[in-house]
């Protein structure tokens, strides 16, 4: 990576991390901390947890399109301001309805797809996977840290303390955007990072993308629904409360991360991504299913450890698989659809998890999660293993389009070519294991 790429990636990853840390901190505590609110019900708890997902899903693609037209930074700054306002509303709320409004307002700062597009703008293709890995790492670290900080902050300052801290994190994000993200005219808005409504219909019909979108919906459905029940299980059945709670979450999530690593490494090394993927989905489903039966402290903690280990693997695998499966020139649109499905899953998980808790208790929550994951497993059977594809941006120059297509299509390893009217660029998808880069070198857009 160049110095510019590294600085841009680290700063964007920190903005991601600040936002997600604020959003995640409520998960381990909100089910317990709101129990004495006057309008508390399990269903309302689920709506509060999932409210941000609904507004994120609605605004993800529109704000991405807006950033293509007015620039990334104005949209990101506006989203962070709205995120802070939502945190203020939630911090002063003393009812579930007020918390719901605050969480929904937080979600209206839907800048995830815009931040991902900014990464694409700042980084070259050959460094983009490293950049995405750094961002994924920041989100994963934020998740683990949030599970520890949530109980600690709540114990000292109450639930409102989490939302005041979230507002501070949003303000830190604004400082990073203003002071740290490079100010340069060299960023490249190109089709790979831009959303296009005209492409959405075709992408929704793509069988591989369908399965990946269903997958991220089910994964975040499961995560949000599980946190309807996990806090009360740990407090009431396992007996974990107070100062012990952060360390239990660290053990579950950190241990899950280290359990996931060997399987991920082996699946990449031996090209067994699909097998590892299906095993992880089934492990999550069986863990949730077994949690509906007689739970003891040891069994519950073991099942939760397996659940989070599989979750970590799938959370890391899905976006990587998506980037390899995207049709040439449509990564920005595909990521927008993917993010929308992810946040819809979070909303649906909160809603259905809360309803199941109210109607059938804890067994209903874990039963609904198990059913959703089993449906996903069946749907995922049709996935094709990811191919080692990447997209190059080539300069067309003064060559006629038909002549350029004829030249490039005959190069070994070229899979697909997209030429856009009005641009002197071509987006070329290649198999990175066999592509003849020497033949493409004269056309590489630098």
Image (spheres, rainbow, N blue to C red):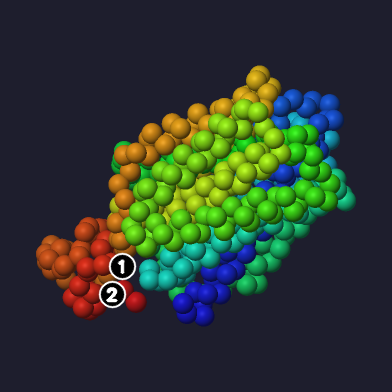
User: Looking at the image, is 40 positioned above or below residue 113?
Assistant: above
Choose top left, top right, bottom left or bottom right for residue 93.
top right
Estimate the x, y position of residue 348 in percent, counting from the top left. Answer: 56, 32
Res 444 label? 2
Q: Badge 1 is on which residue?
A: 393
Image location of residue 232, percent across then percent down: 74, 35
Residue 285 against residue 132 in the figure, above or below: above
**Mark 1 or mark 2, which is nearer the start of the sequence?**
1
Please report contact status of discs 2 and 1: CB closer than 8 Å, yes or no: yes
Looking at this rendering, what residue extends furthest in the right direction?
156
* Residues packed near mark 1 inside 10 Å, few (<14), some (14 to 19) or many (20 plus): many
Give the number of the disc on residue 97.
Answer: none
What's the CA distance linking mark 2 and mark 1?
6 Å
Instruction: Say whether residue 402 is left or right of residue 40.
Output: left
Q: Residue at x 50, y 41 (%)?
A: 283
The residue shown at (53%, 65%) is 134
Residue placed most toward the observer, 56 or 150: 150
Q: Secondary structure at mark 2?
A: loop
Q: How many numbered dots are placed on residues in this image?
A: 2
Q: Nearer the viewer, residue 189 or 165?
A: 165
Image position of 259 with respect to 215: above or below: below
Residue 243 seen by the camera: yes
Q: Quadrant of residue 165?
A: bottom right
Q: Is residue 333 left or right of residue 343?
A: left
**Residue 176 rendering spot, x and y as whole percentages:** 65, 67
User: Which of 272 and 365 lies nearest the eye of the viewer?
Assistant: 272
Q: Residues within 10 Å of mark 2 (few under 14, many from 20)?
A: some
């Amino acid at each position: 990576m160049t110095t510019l790429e590294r600085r841009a990636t680290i700063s964007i990853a920190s903005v991601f991390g600040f936002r997600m840390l604020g959003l995640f901190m409520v998960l381990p505590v909100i089910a317990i901390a709101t129990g004495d609110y006057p309008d508390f019900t399990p269903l309302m708890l689920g709506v509060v947890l999932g409210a941000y997902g609904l507004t994120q899903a609605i605004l993800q693609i529109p704000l991405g399109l807006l950033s293509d037209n007015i620039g990334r930074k104005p949209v990101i700054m506006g989203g962070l301001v709205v995120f802070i306002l939502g945190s203020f509303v939630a911090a002063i709320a003393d009812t579930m309805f007020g918390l719901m409004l605050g969480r929904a307002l937080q979600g209206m700062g839907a800048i995830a797809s815009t931040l991902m597009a900014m990464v694409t703008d700042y980084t070259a293709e050959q460094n983009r996977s490293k950049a995405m890995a750094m961002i994924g790492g920041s989100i994963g670290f934020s998740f683990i840290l949030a599970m520890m900080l949530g109980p600690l902050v709540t114990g000292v300052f109450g639930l409102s303390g989490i939302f005041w801290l979230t507002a501070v994190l949003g303000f830190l994000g604004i400082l990073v955007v203003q002071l740290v993200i490079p100010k340069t005219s060299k960023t490249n808005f190109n089709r790979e990072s831009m959303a296009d409504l005209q492409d959405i219909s075709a992408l929704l019909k793509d069988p591989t993308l369908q399965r990946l979108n269903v997958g991220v919906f089910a994964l975040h459905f499961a995560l949000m629904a599980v946190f309807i029940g996990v806090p009360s299980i740990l407090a009431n059945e396992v007996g974990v409360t107070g100062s012990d709670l952060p360390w239990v979450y660290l053990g579950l999530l950190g241990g899950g991360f280290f359990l996931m690593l060997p399987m991920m490494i082996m699946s990449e090394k031996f090209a067994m991504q699909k097998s590892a993927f299906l095993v992880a989905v089934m492990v999550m489903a069986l863990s949730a299913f077994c949690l509906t039966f007689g739970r003891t402290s040891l069994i519950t903690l073991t099942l939760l450890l397996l659940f989070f280990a599989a979750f970590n693997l799938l959370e890391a695998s899905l976006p990587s698989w998506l980037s390899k499966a995207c049709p040439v020139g449509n990564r920005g649109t595909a990521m927008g659809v993917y993010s929308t499905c992810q946040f819809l899953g979070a909303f649906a998980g909160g809603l259905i998890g809360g309803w199941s808790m109210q109607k059938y208790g804890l067994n209903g929550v874990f039963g609904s999660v198990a059913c959703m994951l089993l449906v996903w497993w069946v749907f995922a059977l049709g996935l094709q293993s990811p191919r080692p594809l990447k997209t190059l941006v080539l300069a067309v120059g003064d060559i006629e389009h038909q002549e350029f297509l004829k030249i490039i299509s005959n190069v070994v390893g070229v899979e697909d070519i997209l030429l856009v009217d009005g641009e002197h660029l071509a987006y070329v998808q290649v198999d990175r294991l066999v592509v003849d880069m020497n033949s493409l070198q004269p056309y590489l857009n630098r």
